[in-house]
Image (spheres, helix red, strand yellow):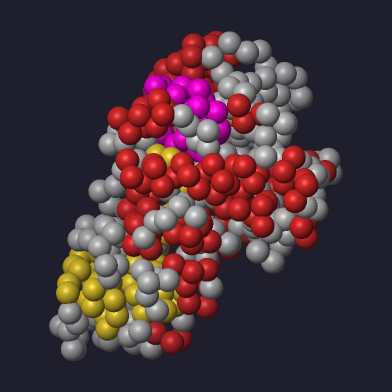
Amino acid sequence: MSRTVFTGGLVFDGTGTQPFPGEVVVEDKRVTHVAHGWTEAPRHHEERRVDCTGSTVMPGLIEAHSHLTFPSAVGHLEPRFNPPLDVSFFHGGCMPDDHLTLAERNAGILLDAGFTTAYSAGSLTPGTVEVRLRDRIRSGAIPGPRLRAASFERDSAPLRPDGTPTSTGAEAVREFVAEQAALGYDNVKFLLSNDDVFTPGGSQQTQYTAAEAQAAAEQARESGVWLNCHAQSAEAVKLAVRNGFRAVYHCTYADEEALDLLEARKDDDLFVAPAVGIVYANVHEGEEFGITREVAERMGQPQCLETMAELYPEMRRRGIPVLPGGDYGFPNNPIGRNARDLDLFVRVFGYAPTEALSAATMLGGRLMGMGDELGLLAPGYLADLLVVRGNPAEDVTLLQDRANLLAIVQEGRFHKADAALGLTEVGAATN
Ligand SMILES: [Zn+2]
């Protein structure tokens, strides 16, 4: 049995309490011991010790709104997918195998950024690219975050892969959910509302009826998949909550009634992710990509950011589980920059750094349906962890610099181990 002790540094266990000087013991794929204080010398003759002096050991980050099939990643910007200005990415014929190659690259980049798990918010195209991606990560064929794969996003009158429109109504919704489940998806995504980004005034347009949302929920239960939704309007949020959608994204225009509903269900496997990263990028970091102030305003983005900045402190006050995950995959918001969402939780929403970190770890484990084995450093939990130079509970921006990620570990296996850790092998321990 391989045994690794992360010692000499701080431990942030994911619960939201302040980091403490301590050590974490990993045996094979799980954490077996978390202790306050440090041991001086190996207690076992086969023990690998990782010197975490000056660093913090914490659970791997979990992305709650990932789009690994979106084309832009750090170092690989794709201007041809920059909606609404340019969507010519689709015109060249995005062949499934090429798309899979791109998604695999993105998965590696997201893992390199410290995200050991990702909950997908939707695929860019119909078909099975993200299912294949998930399976290739799971089998160890490629590096990447543990993934729950999500279908492409069903609009109110979506197109089939062959280009023909599907019909609306409860039966069509049921059929879609069953089809996506049969393709192997874990999550099925609905655009319960439109969006100002797509069409002026779109965020207030609710695109599904109560009967359709209920049909989706019934079929999801029958097919064993979970539902995600894009929900900007208050009515869309209410539809989602009333019908047991698991991940409710954006929620920007939630009214009092929607907030009350969210709060009433806050312990029932209901999770909110604002996806603030893209909104912030559209308002402040779009110029270079043609998203001028004028374009951002046409897309409703300054108003969206202002509304979120008032709404999310209220969600926090009510104890609604809100998770980082910011629609990364656009040229001004590329995959790999995902940890920036934690800083936005702190700066824009008023979260304490420990709360933002806990949302990206402990709550992420719950979102994945793995709350008893993922997202915390505690005995029995999967050893998905990071060693971060410095103390991210004092400054979450440390997580944005890959050079600070000294170690990235998934289920006890080192994806990355910086030389600075002075990793020493004792005895014959291998991993
Ligand atoms: Zn999204």
Residue 417 position, x and y percent, is 44, 78
Residue 191 position, x and y percent, is 59, 29
Which of the 4 quarters of the picture holds residue 195? Answer: top right
The reply to whether residue 86 is in sight is yes
Q: Is residue 131 left or right of residue 385?
A: right
Q: Is residue 155 left or right of residue 339?
A: right
**What stretch of residues is rendered in magenta?**
228-250
The quadrant of the image that shows the N terminus is bottom left
Residue for point 42% across, 79% down: 389
The quadrant of the image that shows the C terminus is bottom left
Residue 190 position, x and y percent, is 56, 28
Residue for point 37% across, 72% down: 394
Residue 257 position, x and y percent, is 40, 25
The reply to whether residue 321 is in sight is no
Magenta-span inclusion, residue 150: no
Residue for point 25% across, 48% down: 372
Which of the 4 quarters of the picture holds residue 44? Answer: bottom left
Residue for point 48% across, 60% down: 347
Magenta-span inclusion, residue 237: yes
Work out whether 303 lies above or below 13. Answer: above
